[in-house]
Each structure stands twice: as structure tokens, then as C-alpha cells.
């Protein structure tokens, strides 16, 4: 690729963002899964000769660029955002199917696809198991966007999301071992098996320790600040810091990010975040994840067009069949003894195990002299395209066929009342909390409570007089209380939605109302401040 200066790179990046945002906006307006639309449009752009977009295509389809953007820039953000908003309680409620799929399912898929491609496609052992690792990683973004639009049961959504978060980490570890160490371990015989298992345990355990340590440290740090812009910066440092620190000592960066974000989003939210901070951090990462996903799926579409598929349809078709069978064995086999998991859910989990950008980024990260690299590129790109487009489009009819859409008829009015009641109760509780924080904490005045009672009464009198003389002080305090109340109401609505007490539709209704009220208060605050200073 010709040399590109920084200004040119920025222009190309801006064009990519504009295209991704435009396609995403249209897809959302038409109520269609935006990842699938991005992949299809990206593929069409890659196939067509559009002169103005040629520099962008050349830039994006450079393997090193794609690999860097996906693995280093976007992967920590996407994993962090998903884990940040996943409650421990939901993971705990669905731990059996999640653990069965993430661990048992991933290993089953890895073994079935690895041995099958070795014996049926004639791939060497390293190439076969590298491919198996690539095909064991799932990308639930497309499926979850469809689930959300259709109101699918939260437990099913949590299961497929939880599986993906943990199985991505395991798949990356298996990929690295297969690509760079498998032959050496095989030459060592049974001793090599022990060494391989120890290496796997070291990489996974290292990621868990670093992620947990970073997450705990940043969670404690937030206790000393009530400043959401600063705490958003802490979350950015946490996700990327955990990833880079883990990778620098050759343990799993993916697992480190997931554990760090889970810790920060659950423990950190309880010990160090106000409702204001939680709302703003979630909003920030919502935007970051949407932007990252939009760019990633458009890049996948562009990247797929680099591959020459001619005369490869036979091996592609057989590889696709192996991957689909491997996924089926993994899902049905690993969940065989999991009670309470409906058969219809198993079918959706099976067909919803899509492959995505992580698989492509990993295969592009292979050294140029890796034996079988071109074959892996062709197979991986073909199956990712089939997965995102064919499986992504057909998952919606499958959900309808099994009747997995949430049924809220007859209960909408009840949900409306419950949501309204809870949001107002949450607002009142937060107002009382903020009001109590205006006075000296009880540990300070507890022993001298009697002697201070008169002083407190005097303070109240002085405060009342001050508010009468300076009405803008009262207005300012009312605005602060209103903001905290609305933030708390927003958090309560989110909690009710996550616990399936109210539907996504009702939750979104009240979130829109609250966001609108917050916007009005912000505008009034700005106008009052402007008038006061002039």
C-alpha cells in the first residue's frame, strides 16, 4: 500500500464513519439488523469499481490495518461495553447454560471441527485446529439486535451474550496455541499434552487475575470521585489498560477485559457510582459500541472482497457443513444435562452462533509465511459471510416459528403503572439521599447531637433567609435535585427492564420521557446561568 500521511488517513477514517453511520441509520429506520446491512453494502462496495472509494478500499483491506483496528482499537471497547452492562445476577441465574456453552461447547466445537477438517478436507493438524479455533468464536451483535427489536426473553439473550463473552476469550487462547505451539507440543508426546494444558490454564488464569485486579482497583478509585466525565475516562483506561497489560505478559487480553468490565459494572457501580455516573457511563459506551460495530461490519464487508473464491466452492461448501455440524454438536451436546433449557432455545442458540469480525481479524493476524494461510483466509471469510447474511437474516423467522417473542398483550397497562410508580419512588428516594448529604454525617456529630441541635436549627433559619434574599440559589438547588431524581428514575427503569418486570417498549417510553426532561432542565440551567453572568 502506498504511503499515506496522517491527514489522508484521517480523511479516509471520516469517510468510513460517515458511510457506516449512514447505512446504520437507514437500517435502524427500516427496523432491520444494521450489522447485516453493513456487511452486504460493504461487500457490494468492495465488488463495484467506485473511483472515489478506491483509496478507502485499499486502506481498509490492508491486512495489518484491519487487524490493528479490530483487535487493538475496537475489541476492548466492544467486549467492555457488553460486559459492563451485564448484571452478575443475570449471569448467575443463567450460569449453567452459559458455562456449558462457553466451556463445554467451545471445546466440543474445537475438537469436532479440528479433526473433521483434518480428515475430510486434508488440512494439516495445525491448520485444521487453527480453523477450528476461528470457527469456535461467536459474534452475537446481529442476533442481539434482532432479539431486542422482537422483545425476546432476557434469559435467552443473556445466555447467548454470556456464551460469546467467555467463549471469545477461550477461542483466542486456542487459536494462539494451535497456530504457534501445537506442533511443538505434538513432538513432545504426552508431555506436550501436559505442557499445552498448563499453557492454556496460565493464559486463562492470567487474564482472570489481571481483569479482576484492574476492575477492583478502578472500582475503588471511583469511590473518591463523583465526576462522571472523569469516571468515563477511568472506564476507558480500564478496558484498554487491562487488555494491553494482559497481552504484554502473554495472557488473555480478551478475558481480562471481560472480567474487568464485569467487575466495574457490578461491584464498581455499587461502591462508587452515583445514578448520574452510571447513566452517563452507559450512554457513552452505547455510543462507542454502536460506532465501533458499525465500522467493524462495514470493514468486514469490504475485506471479504479481497479473497479469490474461484474454484474453491467445493472445499468451502464442505467446510461450511462441518462448521454447522460442529456447532450443533457443541450446543446440543454441552447443554444435554442442563435442566430448564427449552428445546426451542437450543435451536435458536445453535443457529444464532454467528461468526464475525473477531474470526477475520485473527486469521489476518497469521504471519504471511504461515503454511495454509490462504486456505484459512478463503474458508474463514466465506463462512463469516454466510453466517452474517444467511443465518442473520433467517434467525428472525426462526424466533417467530418457535413463538419466542415476548407476549405483553393485556399487561401493558399494568407495566405502565408499575414503571411510573417505581420511577417516582426512585426519584423521591434519591432526593432524600441528596438532602441528607447536605448536613454533617452522623459519625461526626453523633456524640454531640444534643449540643448541635440548636445550631442546626439556626442553620435552617439562615438558609431560609438566604434563599429568600437570593432566589437563584433555591432555583439552582431545585435543578440539582431534579437532575438527581431523573437520573435515579432512569436507573430504576433500566433495572426493571433487565429484570423483565417491564417490556423493552415500556422501558424505552419512559427513558425517552426522562431524557427529554433532562434535556429541558439542562437548557433551562444554561439560560439561567447565561442571564446571571451577563
Image (tube, helix red, strand yellow):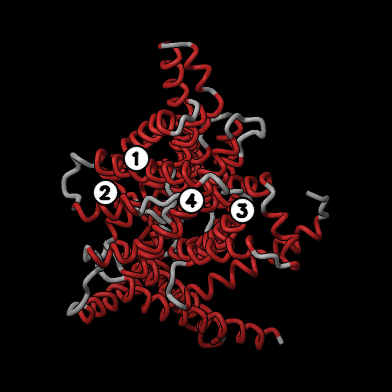
Q: Earlier in the sequence, mark 1 or mark 2?
A: 2
Q: Earlier in the sequence, mark 3 or mark 2?
A: 2
Residue in the image at 46% along x and 16% along y: 195
Residue in the image at 55% along x and 44% along y: 378
Q: Mark 2 sits on what residue?
A: 94
As helix, strand or loop, the secondary structure at mark 2 comes to: loop
Tell me where residue 85 appears, x and y as whole percent: 41, 56
Front disc: 3 or 2: 3
81 left or right, relative to 501: right
As helix, strand or loop, the secondary structure at mark 1 comes to: helix
Q: Earlier in the sequence, mark 4 or mark 2?
A: 2
Question: Marks 3 and 4, how far apart in space?
Answer: 11 Å
Q: Mark 4 sits on what residue?
A: 384
Q: Mark 3 sits on what residue?
A: 303
Front disc: 1 or 2: 1
Tell me where residue 144 appears, x and y as whole percent: 39, 60
Question: Marks 3 and 2, how far apart in space?
Answer: 36 Å
Q: Residues within 10 Å of mark 1 (few under 14, many from 20)?
A: many
Residue sticking out furthest to the front: 311
Screen quadrant of the C terminus? bottom right
Residue in the image at 63% along x and 82% along y: 529
Q: Earlier in the sequence, mark 1 or mark 3?
A: 3
Q: Residues within 10 Å of mark 4 (few under 14, many from 20)?
A: many
Q: Mark 1 sits on what residue?
A: 326
152 left or right, relative to 448: left
401 left or right, relative to 324: left
Question: Marks 1 and 4, how far apart in space?
Answer: 15 Å
**Is 186 drawn above or below residue 348 in the view shown?**
above
Amino acid at each position: 500500500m502506498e504511503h499515506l500521511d496522517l491527514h489522508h488517513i484521517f480523511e479516509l477514517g471520516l469517510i468510513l464513519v460517515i458511510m457506516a453511520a449512514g447505512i446504520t441509520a437507514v437500517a435502524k429506520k427500516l427496523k432491520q439488523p444494521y450489522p447485516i446491512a453493513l456487511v452486504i453494502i460493504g461487500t457490494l462496495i468492495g465488488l463495484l469499481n467506485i473511483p472515489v472509494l478506491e483509496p478507502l478500499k485499499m486502506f481498509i483491506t490492508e491486512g495489518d490495518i484491519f487487524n490493528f483496528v479490530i483487535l487493538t482499537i475496537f475489541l476492548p471497547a466492544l467486549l467492555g461495553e457488553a460486559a459492563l452492562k451485564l448484571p452478575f445476577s443475570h449471569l448467575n441465574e443463567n450460569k449453567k447454560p452459559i458455562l456449558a456453552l462457553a466451556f463445554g461447547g467451545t471445546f466440543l466445537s474445537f475438537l469436532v471441527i479440528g479433526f473433521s477438517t483434518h480428515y475430510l478436507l486434508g488440512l494439516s493438524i495445525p491448520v485444521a485446529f487453527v480453523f477450528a479455533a476461528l470457527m469456535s468464536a461467536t459474534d452475537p451483535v446481529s442476533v442481539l439486535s434482532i432479539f431486542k427489536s422482537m422483545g425476546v426473553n432476557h434469559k435467552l439473550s443473556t445466555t447467548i451474550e454470556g456464551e460469546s463473552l467467555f467463549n471469545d476469550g477461550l477461542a483466542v487462547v486456542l487459536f494462539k496455541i494451535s497456530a504457534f505451539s501445537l506442533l511443538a507440543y505434538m513432538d513432545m508426546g504426552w508431555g506436550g499434552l501436559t505442557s499445552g494444558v498448563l499453557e492454556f490454564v496460565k493464559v486463562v488464569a492470567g487474564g482472570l487475575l489481571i481483569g479482576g485486579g484492574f476492575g477492583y482497583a478502578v472500582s475503588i478509585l471511583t469511590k473518591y470521585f463523583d465526576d462522571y466525565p472523569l469516571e468515563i475516562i477511568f472506564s476507558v483506561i480500564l478496558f484498554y489498560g487491562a487488555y494491553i497489560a494482559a497481552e504484554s505478559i502473554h495472557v488473555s487480553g480478551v478475558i481480562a477485559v471481560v472480567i474487568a468490565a464485569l467487575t466495574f459494572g457490578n461491584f464498581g457501580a455499587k461502591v462508587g457510582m452515583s445514578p448520574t455516573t452510571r447513566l452517563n457511563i452507559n450512554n457513552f459506551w452505547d455510543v462507542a459500541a454502536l460506532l465501533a460495530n458499525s465500522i467493524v461490519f462495514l470493514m468486514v464487508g469490504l475485506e471479504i472482497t479481497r479473497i479469490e473464491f474461484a474454484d474453491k466452492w467445493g472445499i468451502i461448501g464442505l467446510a461450511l457443513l462441518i462448521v454447522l455440524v460442529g456447532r450443533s454438536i457443541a450446543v446440543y451436546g454441552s447443554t444435554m444435562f442442563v435442566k430448564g433449557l427449552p428445546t426451542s432455545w437450543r435451536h435458536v442458540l445453535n443457529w444464532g452462533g454467528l461468526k464475525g469480525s473477531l474470526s477475520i481479524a485473527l486469521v489476518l493476524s497469521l504471519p504471511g509465511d504461515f503454511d495454509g494461510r490462504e486456505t484459512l483466509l478463503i474458508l474463514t471469510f466465506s463462512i463469516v459471510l454466510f453466517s452474517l447474511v444467511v443465518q442473520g437474516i433467517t434467525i428472525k423467522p426462526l424466533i417467530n416459528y418457535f413463538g419466542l417473542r415476548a407476549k405483553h398483550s393485556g399487561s401493558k397497562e399494568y407495566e405502565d403503572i408499575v414503571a411510573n410508580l417505581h420511577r417516582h419512588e426512585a426519584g423521591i428516594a434519591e432526593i432524600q439521599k441528596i438532602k441528607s448529604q447536605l448536613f454533617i454525617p452522623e459519625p461526626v456529630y453523633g456524640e454531640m447531637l444534643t449540643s448541635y441541635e440548636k445550631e442546626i436549627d439556626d442553620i435552617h433559619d439562615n438558609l431560609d433567609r438566604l434563599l429568600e434574599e437570593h432566589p437563584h440559589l433555591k432555583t439552582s438547588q431545585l435543578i440539582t435535585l431534579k437532575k438527581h431524581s431523573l437520573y435515579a428514575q432512569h436507573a430504576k427503569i433500566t433495572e426493571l427492564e433487565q429484570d423483565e418486570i417491564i417490556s423493552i417498549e415500556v422501558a424505552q417510553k419512559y427513558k425517552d420521557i426522562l431524557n427529554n426532561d433532562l434535556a429541558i432542565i439542562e437548557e433551562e440551567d444554561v439560560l439561567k446561568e447565561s442571564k446571571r453572568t451577563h
